Image (cartoon, coloured by chain):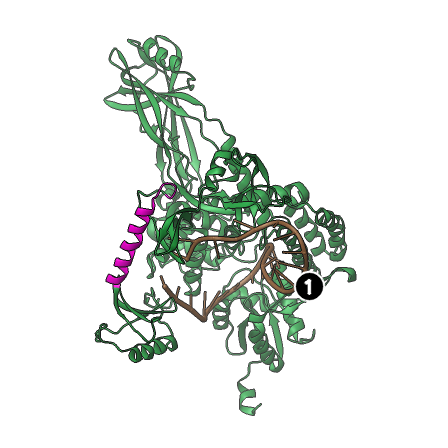
Chain colours: A green, B brown
DNA sequence: CAGTGAGCGAGCTTCCGCTTGACTT
């Protein structure tokens, strides 16, 4: 190394986890410090194989992850020439482990290494951290090793059982399997729910020329009750019996954590969990917000001062109320701040629509968290009537001081109907007579529990202490990728309901219709998800227990306190667990959720439904019999639990030979993309109105011919010497196609006159040239604040 | 784009948690 290079080499190397963080901290520390990042974990167990030597006290086999080799090499080089290496990874279990892996992999010595921690990225916090270095906390590292290895043992011992017993490439794990369980159980609750009708009675009254609504204090069960009450109320007198005023307050919600941000972005902006994280990541990288993977609701003093100034400036002193919030979730490790804007004076940012909306949400939530309570005056009016004992209740809310509501209110998870009758109430006196405008008794229906959305599942997982801010989004994607869960939007069905109305002296009734049971982006379990869940639940009760994570977390804490050896904890868990793995494996029986549906009347053979290698299917005939059984896949809209013998027999009718054309057989079936006709190796979609069960040879031929004519119309040129290359007319103009890939044709060329050579050259060139990024919108750089 | 499915047995699949890019129709 040259002397010149040595001279500019910094004395200190400080390593953090995130590159964006490194940039910020480098600015705070000045030229004596080089700040780099590890970009997360650098070491892990190998992907292939268990990577844990169980016989030798769970000795882990750590390897540098392939995508981190370069980073490690670079850090190693810098570490060699530095006088002091500062390990500034996050102050939590995982951060401590990263520091420990860095120490080992970079070949550091205790003498030249210092471990520092901070909870917020502010100049004073970093400088303070540098003043108080410590050593790596091996107990905390051991707690991480216990966590890591337990997860590996569970995941890598359970998954292969599923491959063998149910179908290949499935997976199980401490987090994902419980997430699936929640969804399966919720679905069963919804399906078992018996909806009960009732009548909700709402009167409209007038006092001092103001019309307001009041609800009967109890629900009525039957139609007779509803109609009977209204008839009884004909000509009755309505009187204010009492009026009660109660002042109350409402406080703002805590600043955002990962989980609450995901929930609010889902409710207010309809973002998926992954989308929220993607957008937040880009805001973070640009320096607009603090770190987005956090379980802390804490704000730095700098941030509290910042919000205070902003609130004072925008709304005045009266609205300022600084507060500190306490974390509710039990597993929280609080290595970071809450998610907040880095500069409160920036009310709006430049960026994509999604970025500006998410930033706006974060800004408002943070600002509101440091504002005064809203003061609300609640009024409850009780109305009695002369025809009987039944009373009506009107509730009104008057906001006497808006406080934080000026900026932000948290949303609820939406529920069907159930809206409250609230509004402005007139000023009345006790015993004041009221004019009755009309009274409605509307039929309503009790609601089943709500299916999970991505965000409400995250909320539930967090409440159970399962998963971490960095894994909520990936977990949701995993259970969908494995085919355990589907995110679906379903149209509802029509339902009739009755409304009785008392107006003047008449009681009338009408029947109306409404849509019920519609679902938007809800999580549904698949057949595979249900079968896997039931299998795991029947053999691995402990892992599937909603409290399993909470229990092991308690033990990890004891390890971190230095009061329990991590290998002892693991061995106590592993021996009984592994025993069940072995006995389950030894049992030859498959666990494909097989169910006998009945007997085929034509052949007398048994018809089963079960999970096959490619998903749910029906089977006719036993696998042990001489004759090979017949199989057919379930359709996308069919479920194992509700499949009948009749539906199963129908599935065996396809594919159906409908005739021949040009000496080749034509058959009709239903595929992934709907009904089709197969002719030789070619597929032809059945146009709407044709049924694969009844379509005739004649229609089949017509469909094939029509498709051929379309093909010809689309074709501009085919080359005799190389029929693989074609020039076609597409949606966006002419293009070339070869090997199922499409290539563009320059606008100045006549597609009908291109030669084969010219085409080949253009294809080669496009293959070589790197593709341009699309959908990229340049953003204005934010001015330094 | 749309196929498959037992059994035989080769070899493949898989966890959670920490972090970012490099990629498309």
Quadrant of the snapshot with the C terminus of chain A: bottom left
Q: Which residues are magenta?
A: A692-714
Q: Can residue A733 be seen at all in this image of the molecule?
A: no
The residue beneath circle 1 is A51
- Residue A614 image offset from top left, x and y in percent: 53, 51
Q: Chain of mark 1?
A: A
Residue at the limit of the structure toward the bottom, as seen here:
A3
* Membership of A705 in magenta stretch: yes
- Residue A49 image offset from top left, x and y in percent: 66, 63
From the viewer's perspective, is residue A718 above or below residue A593? below
Q: Residue at x 25, y 76 (%)?
A: A754
Quadrant of the snapshot with the N terminus of chain A: bottom right
Tell which of A24 and A272 is nearer to you.
A272
* Membership of A160 in magenta stretch: no
Q: Residue at x 40, y 57 (%)?
A: A680
- Give the SS element for disc 1: loop
Q: Main secondary structure of the magenta part?
A: helix
């Amino acid at each position: 190394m040259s002397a010149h290079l040595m001279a500019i080499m910094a004395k200190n190397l400080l390593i953090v986890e995130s590159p964006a963080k490194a940039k910020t901290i480098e600015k705070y520390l000045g030229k004596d410090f080089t700040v780099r990042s590890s970009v997360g974990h650098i070491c892990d167990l190998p992907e292939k194989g268990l990577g844990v030597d169980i016989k030798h006290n769970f000795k882990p086999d750590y390897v540098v992850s392939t995508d981190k080799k370069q980073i490690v090499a670079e850090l190693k080089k810098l570490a060699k020439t530095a006088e002091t290496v500062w390990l500034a990874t996050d102050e939590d279990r995982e951060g401590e482990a990263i520091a420990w892996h860095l120490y080992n992999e970079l070949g550091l010595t205790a003498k030249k290494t210092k471990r520092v921690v901070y909870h917020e990225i502010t100049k004073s916090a970093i400088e303070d951290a540098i003043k108080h270095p410590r050593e790596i906390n091996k107990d905390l590292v051991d707690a991480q090793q216990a966590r890591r290895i337990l997860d590996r043992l569970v995941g890598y011992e359970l998954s292969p059982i599923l491959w063998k017993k149910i179908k290949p490439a499935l997976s199980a794990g401490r987090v994902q399997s419980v997430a699936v369980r929640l969804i399966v159980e919720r679905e069963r609750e919804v399906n078992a729910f018996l909806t009960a009708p009732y009548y909700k009675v709402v009167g409209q009254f007038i006092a001092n020329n103001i019309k307001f609504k009041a609800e009967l204090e109890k629900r009525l069960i039957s139609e007779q009750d509803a109609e009977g009450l209204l008839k009884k109320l004909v000509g009755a007198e309505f009187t204010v019996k009492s009026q009660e005023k109660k002042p109350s307050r409402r406080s703002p919600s805590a600043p955002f954590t990962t989980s609450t941000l995901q929930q609010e972005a889902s409710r207010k902006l309809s973002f998926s969990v992954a989308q929220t994280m993607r957008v937040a990541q880009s805001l973070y990288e640009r320096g607009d917000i603090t770190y987005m993977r956090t379980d802390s609701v804490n704000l730095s003093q700098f941030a509290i001062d910042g919000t205070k100034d902003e609130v004072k400036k925008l709304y005045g002193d009266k609205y300022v109320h600084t507060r500190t919030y306490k974390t509710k979730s039990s597993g929280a490790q609080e290595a970071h701040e809450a998610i907040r804007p880095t500069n409160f004076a920036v009310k709006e940012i430049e960026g994509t629509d999604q970025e500006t909306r998410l930033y706006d949400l974060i800004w408002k939530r943070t600002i509101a968290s440091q504002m005064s309570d809203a003061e609300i005056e609640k009024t409850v009016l009780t109305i009695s009537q002369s025809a009987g004992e039944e009373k009506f209740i009107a509730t009104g809310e008057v906001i006497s001081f808006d406080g934080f509501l000026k900026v932000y209110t948290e949303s609820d998870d939406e529920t069907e109907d159930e809206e409250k009758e609230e509004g402005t109430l007139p000023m009345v006196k006790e015993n004041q007579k009221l004019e009755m405008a009309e009274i409605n008794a509307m039929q309503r229906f009790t609601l089943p529990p709500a299916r999970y959305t991505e965000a409400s599942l995250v909320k539930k997982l967090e409440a159970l202490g399962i998963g971490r801010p960095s894994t909520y989004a990936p977990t949701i994607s995993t259970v969908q990728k494995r085919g355990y869960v589907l995110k679906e939007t379903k149209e509802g069905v029509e339902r009739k309901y009755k409304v009785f109305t008392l107006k003047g002296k008449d009681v009338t009734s009408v029947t109306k219709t409404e849509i019920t049971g519609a679902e938007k982006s809800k999580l549904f379990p698949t057949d595979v998800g249900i079968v896997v869940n039931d299998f795991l639940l029947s053999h691995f009760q402990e892992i599937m227990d909603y409290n399993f994570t909470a229990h092991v977390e308690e033990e990890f804490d004891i390890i971190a306190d230095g009061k329990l050896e991590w290998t002892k904890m693991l061995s106590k868990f592993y021996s009984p667990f592994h025993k069940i793995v072995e006995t389950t494996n030894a049992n030859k029986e498959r666990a494909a959720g097989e169910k006998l549906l009945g007997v085929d009347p034509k052949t007398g053979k048994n018809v089963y439904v079960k999970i096959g290698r490619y998903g749910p299917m029906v089977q006719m005939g036993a696998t042990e019999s001489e004759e090979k059984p017949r199989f057919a896949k379930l359709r996308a809209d069919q479920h194992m639990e509700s499949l009948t013998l009749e539906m199963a027999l129908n599935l065996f009718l396809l594919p159906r030979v409908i005739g021949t054309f040009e000496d080749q057989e034509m058959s009709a079936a239903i595929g992934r993309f709907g009904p089709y006709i197969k002719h030789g190796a070619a597929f032809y979609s059945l146009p709407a109105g044709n049924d694969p069960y009844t379509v005739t040879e004649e229609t089949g031929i017509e469909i094939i011919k029509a498709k051929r004519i379309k093909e010809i119309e689309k074709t501009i040129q085919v080359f005799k010497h190389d029929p693989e290359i074609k020039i076609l007319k597409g949606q966006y103009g002419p293009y070339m196609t070869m090997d199922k890939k499409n290539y563009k044709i320059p606008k100045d060329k006549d597609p009908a006159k291109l030669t084969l050579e010219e085409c080949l050259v253009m294809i080669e060139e496009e293959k070589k040239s790197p593709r341009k990024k699309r959908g990229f919108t340049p953003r204005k750089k934010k001015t330094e604040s």
